[in-house]
Image (cartoon, rainbow, N blue to C red):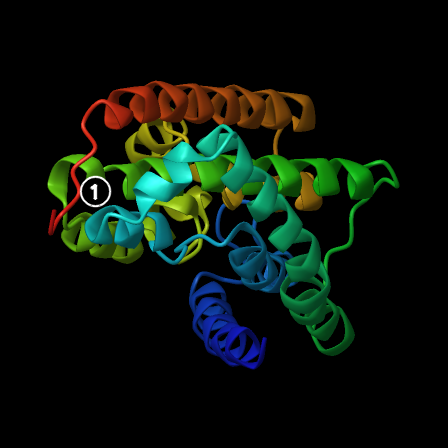
Amino acid sequence: MTTNVVFGLLRVAILVAALKAANGEIADYDVAATNTYVWIGQGLLGFVLLWGNNELAERVRSGDVVVDLYRPWHLQGALLAEDIGRGGYAFLTRLAPPAVFGMLLFPFQFPAHVYQWPLFGASALIALVTSFGVRFLVELSAFWLIDNRGLYGFWNVTSGLLCGLTVPIAFFPEWAREVLWMTPFPALLQAPIDVFLGHGNVVKLLLYQLFWAAAVLAIGHFALQRAVRKVVVQGG
């Protein structure tokens, strides 16, 4: 939480300086909207667990995943349930504190309508599910790569930019915005922030998120079925 707040202060300083150089506004972001984007984003970062822990991939490398596959559960469903439970705790310890910090100490753009609050909650939950789905696919790659740390590191380096954590996607050139919004990445962070700020059509944003949540979970289910046929236990 402390790290999130410190990095939030650095990001606010840089982005507000950029706004001042651009006469106080870039795209739909003024100072208040930018502060809100930063602090909600810092909170969502821990809530959706953008970078994960690569635990499943490590279990594939060691062969311990065989125990998981023997258990009477659907591995993807069990891990998703665990991640949602983690998210409930992270809401109180990772999402709320940076958001409250920003609300109290910086110009903040609150939702214009009361209904945006529950819609933001729904959007954040869908973002968590989508994030799990993407992380699950990255970790499943270990069934074929054995050591997926290269892919995992590449995801850690690029995901912040692709998801709208580094800068708002609205700051990108038009062609880059169009390409990114055809992928699941903005559904992880930028879409919930847009719902909170009231940027764009809220219904379309939620439908976009639901589509990608369902898509990545379906792809993950198919990939898991293929992976089970390719179980490799190192060391005998």
Q: Residue at x 69, y 39 (%)?
A: 198
Q: Is residue 191 visible?
A: no
**Residue 1 appearing in the image:** yes
Q: Position of residue 169 (x, y in %)?
A: 42, 44
Q: Quadrant of residue 215?
A: top left
Please indicate whether residue 142 sits to the left or right of residue 191 in the image: left
Mark 1 secondary-structure assignment: helix
- Write down the quadrant of residue 52 in the picture: bottom left
User: Relative to 14, does residue 64 appear above or below in the rendering?
Assistant: above
Looking at the image, which is closer to me, 58 or 104?
Answer: 58
**Residue drawn at x 24%, y 47% as measured from the top left:** 63
- Residue 126 position in % (x across, y down): 60, 34
Q: Position of residue 219 (x, y in %)?
A: 36, 21
> Is residue 91 placed above or below 82 in the rendered structure?
below
Q: How many marks?
A: 1
The amino acid type of the residue labelled 1 equals Ala
Instruction: Please identify the quadrant where the N terminus is shown.
Output: bottom right
Give the labeled residue for mark 1: 142
